[in-house]
């Protein structure tokens, strides 16, 4: 079965640079979620989109922005990168955004900021 | 307040032993879902199970079983006859009606299975 695709899988950036992470949800899934997992931490919710509209917002820094496109893929844009942004970034998708829908996670993008 | 507590930070057992991972949750919602995810060393998050707040039936899937008890707000996960491939970090998670988008994760339990 098709899974969530994230690209790139690994990314190395310098401080103050920008980065764009991409997420392609499971076919027919219309809801996308972004999570950040720091080293040794549990994943923290950043933001979600349902039918191309932002549906919820968590602890996402103002330096980050995201959007969902007409084909339901999503991009997380990160600017003025800081050392503390080094983390594993997960995208998840679900069929609709209801509380009962399972979020299926992609393999993650490992971002290292030097 | 909503919270998921996994008190066991690390567990190490010998292969073929049974092991139970504890999970205690807090929520004021009457409608919520509980999940378990597995994160192997490769890093991906693998969905294992979903249970809604109105269904307290225990579930068994092969060597895995889950015990949901609303009276104690617990959703424990047992691996029977553990194998080395079960070594991973296991996260218990909560998704509640009042904040439907986000999943709240516990801090995870690192399970090591020794051959």
Image: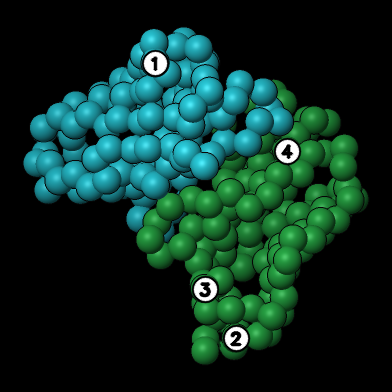
Chain colours: A cyan, B green
Residue B30: horizontal and vertical position, in percent? 83, 31
Q: Which residue is mark 3?
A: B85
Mark pair 4, 1: CA separation: 28 Å
Which label sits in the foreground, 1 or 3? 1
Q: Which residue is mark 1?
A: A71
Q: Mark 2 and mark 1, same subunit?
A: no
Q: Mark 3 and mark 2, same subunit?
A: yes
Above or below residue B53? Residue A62 is above
Name the chain under label 4.
Answer: B
Above or below residue A85? Residue A75 is above
Q: Please, which residue is most extreme toward the front here?
A: A1
Q: Which residue is mark 4?
A: B33
Which mark, by number, is residue B15? 2
Please tell me which residue is depicted at 43% across the width and 52% down the height of the picture.
Answer: B44
Q: Nearer the viewer, residue A113 or B54?
A: B54
Badge 1 element:
loop
Which label sits in the foreground, 2 or 1? 1
Which label sits in the foreground, 4 or 1? 1
Tell me the crowding category of disc 1: few under 14, some 14 to 19, or many 20 or more residues within 10 angstroms, Cα based. few
* Left or right relative to A7: residue A68: right
Tell me the crowding category of disc 2: few under 14, some 14 to 19, or many 20 or more residues within 10 angstroms, Cα based. some
Q: Earlier in the sequence, mark 2 or mark 4?
A: 2
């Amino acid at each position: 079965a098709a899974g969530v695709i994230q690209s790139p899988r690994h990314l190395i950036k310098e401080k103050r640079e920008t980065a764009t992470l991409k997420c392609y949800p499971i076919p027919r899934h219309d809801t996308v979620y972004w999570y950040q997992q720091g080293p040794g931490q549990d994943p923290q919710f950043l933001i979600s989109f349902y039918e191309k509209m932002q549906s919820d917002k968590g602890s996402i820094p103002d330096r980050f922005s995201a959007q969902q496109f007409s084909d339901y893929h999503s991009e997380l844009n990160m600017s003025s990168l800081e050392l503390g942004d080094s983390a594993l970034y997960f995208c998840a998708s679900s069929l609709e955004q209801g509380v009962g829908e399972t979020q299926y996670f992609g393999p993650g993008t490992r971002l290292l900021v030097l | 307040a909503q919270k998921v507590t996994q008190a066991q930070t690390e567990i190490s057992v010998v292969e073929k032993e049974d092991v139970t991972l504890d999970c205690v949750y807090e929520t004021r919602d009457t409608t919520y879902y509980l999940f378990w995810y597995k994160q192997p060393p490769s890093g991906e998050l693998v969905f294992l199970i979903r249970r809604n707040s109105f269904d307290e039936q225990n579930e068994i899937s092969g060597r895995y079983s889950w015990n949901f008890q609303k009276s104690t707000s617990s959703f424990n996960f047992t691996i029977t006859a553990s194998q080395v491939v079960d070594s991973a970090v296991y996260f218990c998670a909560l998704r509640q009606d009042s904040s439907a988008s986000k999943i709240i994760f516990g801090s995870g339990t690192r399970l090591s299975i020794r051959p």
